[in-house]
Image (cartoon, rainbow, N blue to C red):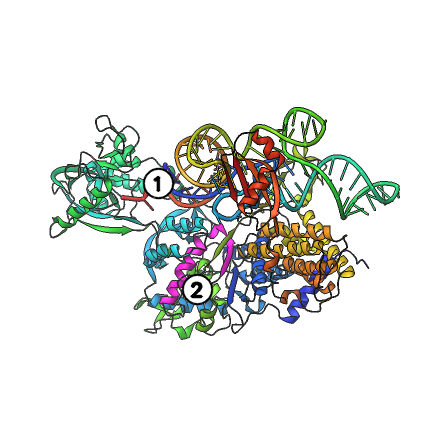
Amino acid sequence: MASERYNAPAREKHWQQAWENAGTFTAKTSGSGPKCYVLEMFPYPSGRIHMGHVRNYAMGDVFARYKRAKGFNVLHPMGWDAFGMPAENAAIERKTHPGTWTYANIDAMKRQLKSMGLSLDWSRELATCNVDYYKHQQAIFLKLFDKGLAYRKSSKVNWDPVDHTVLANEQVIDGRGWRSGALVEQRELTQWFFKITAYSDELLNDLGTLDKWPEKVRLMQANWIGRSEGMLVRWALDARTAPPGHSELEIYTTRPDTLFGASFMAIAPDHPLAKAAAEQDPKLAAFCDECRRMGTSVADVETAEKQGYDTGIRAVHPFDKDWRVRVYVANFVLMDYGTGAIFACPSGDQRDLDFARKYKLPVTPVVLPLGADAKTFVIGDTAVDGDGTMINSRFLDGLTTTAAFEEAAKRLETATLGKAPLGQRKVNYRLRDWGISRQRYWGCPIPMIHCEVCGVVPVPAKDLPVQLPEDATFDKPGNPLDRHPTWKQCACPQCGKPARRETDTMDTFVDSSWYYVRFTAPDATTPVDTKAADYWLPVDQYIGGIEHAILHLLYSRFFYRAMGDAGLGTKNLREPFSALFTQGMVTHETYKSESGAWLLPTEVELKGEGEARTAIEIASGNAATIGSVEKMSKSKKNLVDPDDIIAHWGADCARWFMLSDSPPERDVIWTEAGVQGAGRFVQRIWRLVDEIADKGAPTGAAMPASLSSDATELRRTAHKALDATGRNIESLRFNVAVAQIYEFTNALSGALPKSSEGLDWALREAAEILVQLIAPMMPHLAEECWARLGYNTLAANQPWPKADPALLVDDRVTIAVQVNGKRRDELTIERTASNQEIEAAALGLEAVVRALEGKPVKKIIVVPQRIVNVVA
RNA sequence: GCGGACGUGGCGGAACUGGUAGACGCACAGGACUUAAAAUCCUGAGUUCGAAAGAGCGUGUGGGUUCGAGUCCCACCGUCCGCACCA
């Protein structure tokens, strides 16, 4: 009896309900089997899920379901990264409260995620904007403050003029705010910081332990931390030229070996020496002002021409008291790296060379590159920064650059200026402390109080939480907390006098730096339940977008360590995510109307194929242009709504398509044809299982004593597919797993019309294996098929079948036969055949004899079970 | 500029530690079923020459190592990504 077409949308709801009723995916800390914590980066509740979420969560779900089937105690939670700017902007636009907007979005998106049939433990759901979450974050902040890991300082910060808030360095991309896209300005403000730099070395070194992270991400983090080994070198200033109170200038260099190539010194416009000199030189003061103005936008800095101003100050070369070097103020020297002062060796550094040429300063080659001729070697317009042999460098001459570094360092360390050594070794980092103050409402309030008498005082733990006021106003720009009439007024916890609350809130990246810890015990009364955290952490497989390679992933690595060091129960664990996978984006073609407006894919009709493809705007009937394939985005309207796809095709179809074809780390192009293909496959599986259930052996029948060769062959195919698919899911090679399932399905369809001894039983076994192979990817269809096969258990609860090792190897193997490296034929032979037998069989092949043309055989190479190459 | 990744049919891609290149999917062509369409099933296909058997060429380009290279080495070209005055 052939059944109806599989009605995915209807049946999916049924099975989702069945899982929910059975509590299938609720994780228990006391569960059996080894633990496995699978996590996808939690979403920002923007309003609706998009295809990128579908892909991300489909991947995580396949992995989680597979691990469950393999007997692991799986934790697979979901929550909401719910604080942040869009809620506040929406509040301004719609005259509502950010919380109202956010919670409505969470409801909508939760419904959407549920329609995907994800194996999530919703009992652990959390939202970072919920006071039950952020009160613990405030407690953590206080602990970090106690440890000196959170502190306040005045510094130049990135100011986003559109969002009216400060941004961390990591959140400035190409000189623009990561969210608003506005050109970022530099402002001097007093802000809260986390001391991530205390972990520079550890964060860098431990990257080496993250062998299940993408190399690319580790490299990006290593570059961001930016460790360099160099020296601090103090230069005496010529007293006749130095401003009062300044007798020396300390610089940072990674190339003390090139000291004899010194041409000039350069200091930042904000360097104390520059400020002192500017007091006596109005032109210099004007130059410094100009530099600062240029520095207002990061984008300007990148294109600005190198400029300098000779301060008239002369510095004395550390190795030659008669050698004077000019000191410039230069617009390219940064005050907050090293000491804000450099010595320049133009022959070895392009930027210094450009500057030297511009201001007609000396250029002395000091490194002779390997293979260059000392007599003819000159520096033109290109600096030479590689290794080589030292020249024009007195006591360093003839040494390699590496040896010269050591020699110069030794001499600088032993020589003195005044009483202290002339130089000392110093490791520098590019990484800066993490500025977390945001002048916005919709974030976690920083639990601090400003008292005129006592200074900055932490809110006592017993007074937590510091809750956001509900009655804030969003009608004008600026910080609603700051202008709230009463909220910031409080009593100083120390002296009791009237004081003022801190009105800055925390960067939302703080929220996401520990949510994975909170998932292990979301209802604990303390921020961390040590027992649960020790059991579940670290996350065994983390999946998310590459865009967080630095931001979220570096912050989390820091925060997890800081929490441990502040006594929050995770001290024995240093890395939060033992394996990381970064998935590619979902892309789609773009369409434009005649007037140049972007069109949704649903607004155009496509015709023809290949080069001849055309698009018509449905509403107007006019021709539309087919544009390039881009990441799905609202601005380009190349969006496909997951709701539409799931309602029409079902979640399984959408999931299957997201996992097919493209390797998961690469971008995938969403196409209508691709979805149709996936939809066809869903029906094909259903028909196949339906037919086998009708004709095949009864549920639970034992294997017949004797099987035909067809039946054995089918069993081999099934068990090989089982083995290979498991390995590919394990290594997240979903596209290959999908291809193997297709191949297996083709073999199964091919065997269906045949009839021989034991074949019905083998068909049934293969069908059951097939259902379990698709279960992680198309879980609803798997349940439907499982039930059709006569079971009243849930497929989701079935253990992953075990492949029979005896079926994984063939008795006879096909070997390619080459003559002089060219494939001429192939031969099928017993797997256990000896090399002699293989050689004999190969030489007997007609194609081989023909290719040899009677030439004598020089040698024969036999690779068992693979290839034989006859060399003549 | 510095650092990194990648380059395979019409398209997405597969190919374990060097061993039958193009699995699987999409698109395509031919056929079956049907009054017809949809759905489904079967067959074909890297390319050139050939009716076929078969042969030549073929993984960005040029060289090299090897019995054998998509895979290893060198140089170059192209695409993409990250960082970017970091001393």
Residue at 35% over, 40% down: A294
Q: Position of residue A637 (x, y in %)?
A: 61, 44
Most frequent secondary structure within the magenta stretch: helix
Q: Would you place residue A329 above or below residue A440 in this image?
A: above
Q: Residues within 10 Å of mark 1 (few under 14, many from 20)?
A: some
Quadrant housing residue A714: bottom right
The residues colored magenta run A538-567
Mark 2: which secondary structure? loop
Q: Could you tell me which chain the residue with mark 2 belongs to? A: A
Q: Residue at x 39, y 66 (%)?
A: A563
The front one of A684 and A455 is A684
Query: Residue A623 magenta-drawn?
Result: no
Find residue A331 and report its image quarter. Answer: top left
Q: Answer with left or right where residue A274 lies relative to residue A649.
A: left
In this image, A643 relative to A631: left or right? right
Say which amino acid is labelled 2.
Answer: Pro
Looking at the image, is mark 2 or mark 1 earlier in the sequence? Answer: 1
Q: Is residue A372 visible?
A: yes
Q: Which residue is mark 2?
A: A445
